[in-house]
Amino acid sequence: MRPDLPTGTVTFLFTDIEGSTRLLHSLGPDAYAEALAQHRRALREAFAAHGGVEVDTQGDAFFVAFPTAGGAAAAARGAQHALASGPIAVRMGLHTGTPTLTPEGYVGIDVHRGARVGALAHGGQIVLSPATAALLDGHELRDVGLHRLKDFDAAIRLSQLDSVEFPPLRTRGSVELPDPATRFLGRERELFDAISLVYEHDPRVLSILGPGGTGKTRFALELGRLLADEAEGGTVFCALAPLREPALVLSTIGERLGASSGDVSAIASRVGEKRTHVVVDNLEHLLPHVARPLGELVQAVPTMRLFVTSREALRVTGEHELDLPPLVDDDAVALFLERARAVGTDIEPTETVQRLCERLDRLPLALELAAARTKHLSPAALYARLGESLDLLKGTRDADERHATLRATIAWSYDLLSDDEQALFSRLSVFRGGCTLESAEAVCDAELDTLASLLDKSLVRKRPGTLGEERFWMLETIKEFARERLAELGEHELGRRHVERMLAIVKSAHLSEDDDEPFQLEVALAERDDLRAALDWTQDHDLELAAVLAVELETFWNAHAQAEGRQRLDRIAASADVLDPGLQARVLRVAGNTTFYVDRDLARSRWEGSLELCRSLGNDRGAAMVLHRLALFPLERGELDGARRMIDESQELAAGRSRLVDAVNLWMYSALALEEGSVEEAIALSEQSAAQASAIGWGWWVSGQRTYLARVALRIGDLEGAEREARAALLIARDHENPLRSAGAVSSIAQVALARRELERAGLLWGWAEAVLTGVSSAEAALTGMSSDDRELFEPLLTELDPAFVTAVQRGRDLDLWDAAAIALGELEPPQTEP
């Protein structure tokens, strides 16, 4: 625990240099380094003069804590005054809260809120959160309006310290990059070269090349962060190491960008005219198959730029390559010393340390692994022992000398492990996306002390998971070595144990529609990489286990991964006739779900096959679940009597034993009532359906019902009811990060705005909803509840070229899901039309 950090109510100051990349490019690395050093001295003097404690530094950004809001404001003013005559302009943000202090520093939502406030400011500007502004009585403050912070739902009113004129707070492209565990060291020259290459050649693809362990990922993250100001459409990170199917690459990129699908046209629509950066990490294992689709993507979306990390180039049009060399001597030594201090060893930069770094070819990962051993071995002992191992191992496994050095370093570190440590190290490589302690124990027979020892030696790492749990993981290069050791051990049953663990986790989340317990979709999302690994293993080893796992993921496929589910289930369904009839019936049902919005005839054939099997087995509940699906076809054709007979039979077979079947059939009866003109009955039945679904945590169905109710309300002219239901639907769809469902709700709110003649708001919302549906089939668009009638409402305004509406539609197409939803919900003021 750092004793110097203030506790209780704390005011955070976040700073960052505005336009740092362009400044670096214009000044050159030497002059920029001097200006950067002067900027750091000026800021630190101002912080110290007013009681500030430096919490962290990332590149050219500071995170400082103050015991009082007044001290923080005075320090920010003093720092801006000191920088006024220099070339560097710094944006600053202040936020006050009561964070939790841990041995690693501050944690809690106040830290994130403060960082987001600072990110909105202009260079030279000091922006305050409401909590800080309330504590600054007597200070001159200026209201700068309501703004939504990234990752926070509600808009907040921000203030500016002092009355200097600045442009309206900018809405920057979101920067969704992982937070590095360590600070960036060295490579200023390489960064300058990369930035210059971007500015001078505007590459569609910049491939950062080098063997494992050279720091490609860390370099790409720093480059993406530095160039974030150039990407008004946002910067996102796509980790491809967990993928084994090249066909999933575009859908992964589309998902990260918020596109409605992984189709090139859908991604192009989402990106639009805004420069967007995508860091694509670790794709060499997917080459050459992934090169063509990525090449076609960047050609079709000229505003997209890919930063790729790989051991080899893609060889596509528009690609520029940047080979990442080892660290220079001084940076290698600095990295080694810092990593040694992280494990509690204070070492001086002696000649022996320099020779050791040189012996390790100045590779970041090799240096880190060696530094982890300084708790027990001096640099001289390390040099002697490691040198002998390198002489024996280097050059025997890989043609690339640097890669050989790294492999030798990992091998040396591995050889120093005990037998138990070696066994656990190898077994942990079965996890593709990391694991919890419970999973490590279940699959690998992990002992906590052994796992902790691997953590101490930097062979395993730890990070918080999305559900609040700790997850253990390996760097990809280390995992590759561990997989080789696992293959040598011949523990073939480990893959099956991993699948069985994933199956147990999925069953605990109750994602099959055969299960009436509350759905927990977030559990599957947290394990998605290892669910893919498990499905890959079963595809090659056990069709029955593959089928069981795939059908247990039914709601996951329906709500979040239709395209991937379709690929997985198509393969299983092709061989389903060798499965047990009960399992075959479930496979056909789920496979029909995933293909319904692409191939209606195939979906009907599969559901009919499932129904036949369920009837032969006397499985009334299974038959009920398929019957209400098959009822969709006569309902769409207007054959209401035929549809009703099928729904009645479904309800009779379920006999009240399935809340899920009840929920779906209530909506089916609602749709019949609406077709027959009984609007009040239709509304009542749909509300009952939503209530049933809500009771079992089936949010995807609830959002669909709320959108349906909004459509019904629009049909009868109930604008308040339509807006209320659409807002409820949108809140759920936004939480699920589901752009299609969100588009349906936003379109309904746009129609309400249109009816009220709020043309600018209607245009913004319709522009976004229409952009989401570009490149989506009409069948898939039905997921949103939208139809051709929606376009017919808005087309006359576009045809007549109503200026306010047309301009708003164009701006709406550039919104992301979060801003569109916030505007629709009234959390964010619509962006003002530029004069």
Image (cartoon, rainbow, N blue to C red):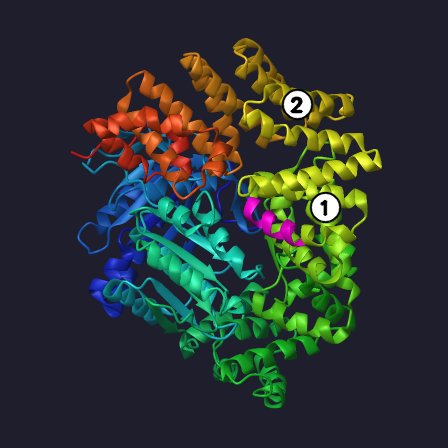
- Which residue, given by chain and number where applicable, does mark 1 sit on? 505
**In magenta segment, residue 568:** yes
Q: In the rendering, at what x and y percent does residue 621 appear?
A: 77, 30
Residues in magenta, as a range: 561-571
Hey, what amino acid is under mark 1?
Ile
Hey, what amino acid is under mark 2?
Asn
Q: In the rendering, at what x and y percent does residue 132 appear?
A: 38, 32
In the image, taking residue 768 as reference, residue 374 lies left or right, namely right
Most common SS among magenta residues: helix
Query: Tag 1: Cα neighbours inside 10 Å, few (<14), some, or many (≥20)?
Result: some
**In magenta segment, residue 328:** no
| Residue at x-position 30% and y-position 42% | 121
| Residue at x-position 55% and y-position 62% | 241
| Residue at x-position 53% and y-position 67% | 339
The dot on residue 270 is: none
The dot on residue 665 is: 2
Residue lying farthest to the left in this orientation? 835
Asked if one can make out residue 441 in the rendered structure from this viewpoint, the answer is no
Asked if one can make out residue 368 in the rendered structure from this viewpoint, the answer is yes
In the image, taking residue 86 as reference, residue 517 lies left or right, namely right
Dot 2 and dot 1 residues touching (CB under 8 Å): no
The nearer-to-camera label among 2 and 1 is: 2
User: Image quarter for residue 700?
Assistant: top right
Query: Tag 2: Cα neighbours inside 10 Å, few (<14), some, or many (≥20)?
Result: many
SS at circle 2: helix
Q: Earlier in the sequence, mark 2 or mark 1?
A: 1
